[in-house]
Amino acid sequence: MNFSSKLLEDAVAEFSKLPGVGQKTALRLVLHLLNQDVQDVDRFSKAISKLRNEIQFCQVCLNISDHPVCQICASPKRDHSLICVVEDTRDVMAIENTNQYNGVYHVLGGLISPMDGIGPSDLEVDSLVERLKTNEVQEVIFALSATMEGDTTLFYLHKRLKNYNITISTIARGIAFGGELEYVDEITLGRSIATRVPYINSLSK
């Protein structure tokens, strides 16, 4: 692609680094910004810069947050005896949108994937175990994607948590194998949480 401006070329190159954005889409986005008021573009760039420089991870659940402790963990209205274990922030958002869950979360930051060089030590497993050392937690719900990596992670987590005096459950498999939680409709996801089953029972299916 030939560019009439090095500034334009550099901007398109940066946008092209975003997932799912090719050169043509990147060019369209950059040209759109060029047609906006300078104040609007400044606001856009400042929002991205502020996001990158000021974003925090909750000290309790590792969810993305504006503060040291996220709004969910800080809320006295949430059921802190119930922890829902998810892969990342997108899954927290998906479950919250169902309005079917009132507990708290624990964000692993990924799934075990030997093919990608991701092992248990790369995930926030130890911090989850630490949370179980209080008597407050009564149930842990595994809400991971129905993929090979998700199932491998579930199996490992169960081995780490099974000796604690808690209920360990997993979301019902109304979600097709290979399905990512963030793409599941809210009704199906909400129902799968409400009808969760003991994890040990799911192994026999």
Image (spheres, grey):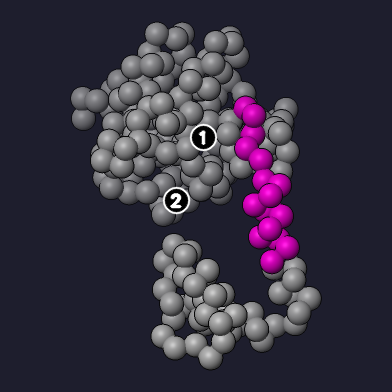
Apparent side of residue 118 relative to residue 75 in the rendered image (left or right):
left
- The numbered dot on residue 107 is 1
Disc 2 crowd, CA 10 A, few/some/many (<14, 14-19, 20+): some
Q: Position of residue 8 (x, y in %)?
A: 57, 82
Q: Amino acid at mark 1?
A: Val
* Residue range corresponding to the magenta coloring: 45-60
Asked if one can make out residue 98 in the rendered structure from this viewpoint, the answer is no
Q: Amino acid at mark 2?
A: Glu
Q: Position of residue 101 (x, y in %)?
A: 55, 36
Q: Position of residue 143 (x, y in %)?
A: 42, 35
Circle 2 is placed at which residue position? 182
The residue shown at (54%, 75%) is: 10
Q: Nearer the viewer, residue 151 or 46?
A: 46
**Sequence-wise first label, 1 or 2:** 1
Kindly state the secondary structure of the residue where label 2 is placed. helix
Kindly state the secondary structure of the residue where label 1 is placed. strand
Apparent side of residue 37 relative to residue 195 in the rendered image (left or right):
right
The residue shown at (31%, 42%) is: 116
Q: Residue furthest bottom?
A: 4
The residue shown at (60%, 14%) is: 136
Q: Nearer the viewer, residue 118 or 194?
A: 118
